[in-house]
Image (cartoon, rainbow, N blue to C red):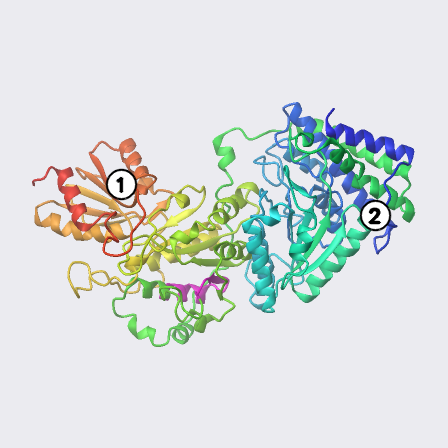
Amino acid sequence: MDRADIVHDNFLRRVAAGDLPGGAAPSGPLSAAEAVSVFRAGCLSRALDRQSRAMQKAGQGFYTIGSSGHEGLAAVAAALRPTDMAFLHYRDAAFQIARAAQVPGQSIAWDMLLSFAASSEDPISGGRHKVLGSKALSIPPQTSTIASHLPKAVGAAYAIGAARRHAPEHKALPDDAIVYCSFGDASANHSTAQGAFNTAGWTSYQSIPLPLLFVCEDNGIGISTKTPKGWIAATFRNRPGLKYFHCNGLDIYETFRVAQEAAHYVRTRKKPAFLHVGTIRLYGHAGADVPTTYLAREEVEAEEANDPLLHSVRLMGEAGALDPETALAIYGEANARVARIAGEAVTRPRLKTAGDVMASIIPPKRLCKPTNGPSDEARAAAFGSDMKAMGEPQIMSRLINWALTDLMLEHPEIVMMGEDVGRKGGVYGVTQKLTQRFGPDRMVDTLLDEQSILGLAIGMAQNGFVPMPEIQFLAYLHNAEDQIRGEAATLPFFSNGQYTNPMVLRIAGLGYQKGFGGHFHNDNSVAVLRDIPGVILACPSNGADAAKMMRECVRLAREEQRVVVFLEPIALYPMRDLHGEKDGGWMRLYPARNEVIPFGEVGVHGDGQDLAIVTFGNGTYLSRQAEKRLAETGVKARVIDMRWLSPLPADALVDAVKGAGRILIVDETRHSGGVAEALMALFAERGDVPVARLTAEDSFIATGPAYAATMPSADSIFDAAMALIGGTK
């Protein structure tokens, strides 16, 4: 017999017989009406769990991780405000149901059953996942089961205080809101969660406002692995900067009281707290999981005897809020109503085509107030002596700095964050003077944790800011890449475009550094970024392009709500010369503020018909050197700078190579999984001229004299071009 049926039968039998579990008497401020509302939410959550299992067996539902045993979280919801943004644990159906009761006009059972049925009418995901979430209830959808949503909860909480000081145009959270973030006891051990707890404590320790309520739903087990008894309390009871609260989640009166206390502390003190809620888990982990395969039957039955709904019936009876007979009727009505609604929900339309599924990968555009940019006086005050230097060619790092200055003057919602971006001015000095120009509120020096940097950006974006996080080196992104892949990029997808977290992520990367290297500081792999749907990857090759592309990237984030990665080639930051010492051939003038390079526009140098060299970043610089040598041999070439690496600007690239007799792809990323693979496929599918590629080796990068040995060089580009042409001209 299915354990869900056993729990159901036990509830009916025991309530009817008055056989209810013992416990403390009801106490606290929970009123009779509130207690009944919390119980109704728990009954509806339980009925939905049972229905989802029935739907899966009938082939009408597709994912059945449930909330049974965690019904007490409805009491936590009752203690909060519906404007407190909530990042929910996947077992928090009762929380969402209880919150829906606080907001008029909700049809929560219908909405959740549409999600169970994967209907395209599901109001949160549009049929893309069985997921908790609601725009009306301030619950962004979460698909995480490993607590990867915790860093962005820290960011959202930080954004509340930041918005009080500098309100962005698209501010979403009230000044007195708190952020709620829940997770399981097993997930609390994940490195992502530990990083978030540490960041919250680190922030609180410095008295920086962070109104964040962590809620650990401790049912004592993660799938089949038990959490040691007392582990969560021992770990969090005395954690610096994090106030600890505990309640018995089987007691809705105690849970409501303690949750109110914790929420009051967070709201008034603007400090984070950790609410430890003791729960149980019914039915096993998810779907077809059978708990008796890894737990003794006696343990499973003991948990089932401790059913939180049975505890609620006893407590409400003792409080005079609801008699057992009426409680039983409410439970039965919830099951009947859910079954009736489910019968209709499974008939509703579902996604059918790839276009249907992909429609929400790219978020909707949003209206932004027009701006004429900063005044001459404001620019003069910000730039100071730099204004005089603008009439002379400059290196890339300085032009990026000036572009950032102009953008931050024009758009006060831009906030930068990262290791050393503020006082030090960035690891390569690109953000020097920005703290003096804009203050520490907009130039946030973070702790050394890439997950926290990206989580801060994601969370701040959900309160209207345009974050510009910096990752010091491309290799460091791998410590935190799931914050982009699993959180930032998926939010529009799983919310049907209702929630977004736009940003411009700056990363110093790629190879060719002579004096400072090794694979941690010279990383030539961008595959992880090109593989993420919806993410834009931009890579300039010179300072003027960098400034103009940065302006477009900010526009894409601010107006089109895109997640943009701006990859800055470290070796080109200080580059001055192109062909000879002191020729200044790679320096550029600062482009006028109205000059931009639109998304997808490639750069073309020359109009040679013999050969088109398609490349980007350092490859553009090296190819320009090789082009001069080729011209001396009679080979007429053009160099095409991709600029936009993902999504591939296919049409622009095909147009750019038209008329060329040969195409040579120069790719400083690796042979396997590199950019060249996509280019080879593009030109094979849409052209009929010979194509060859020159790539980096499938290798990490060495420190010392061999720093560039595994990557293309001007000499190897020349040789590859001559071989492709045929060696003579």
Q: Give percent across and percent down for residue 572.
A: 28, 58
Closest to the observer, 350 or 90 = 90
Q: Which residues are magenta?
A: 402-421
**Residue at 53% over, 47% down:** 487
Q: Is residue 549 above or below residue 590?
A: above
Identity of the amino acid at label 2?
A: Ala
| Residue corresponding to mark 2 | 35
Closest to the observer, 18 or 553 = 18
Q: Quadrant of residue 591?
A: bottom left
Closest to the observer, 265 or 586 = 265
Q: Is residue 55 left or right of residue 528?
A: right
Q: Is 1 a magenta residue?
A: no
Pointers 1 and 2 in contact (CB under 8 A)? no
Q: Is residue 347 left or right of residue 705?
A: right
Q: Which of pointers 1 and 2 indicates the residue nearer the eye?
A: 2
Spatial CA distance of label 1 from label 2 is 68 Å
Q: Give percent across and percent down for residue 434.
A: 42, 69
Q: Which corner quadrant holds the C terminus?
A: top left
Q: Residues within 10 Å of mark 1 (few under 14, many from 20)?
A: few
**Residue at 55% over, 60% down:** 169
Q: Is residue 147 left or right of residue 245?
A: left
Q: Is residue 588 left or right of residue 282?
A: left
Q: Which corner quadrant holds the N terminus?
A: top right
Q: Is residue 696 above or below residue 589?
A: above
Q: Is residue 624 above or below residue 160?
A: above
Residue 463 visible here: no
Question: Secondary structure under badge 1?
Answer: helix
| Residue corresponding to mark 1 | 655
Q: Is 420 a magenta residue?
A: yes
Q: Which is more N-terminal, label 2 or label 1?
A: 2
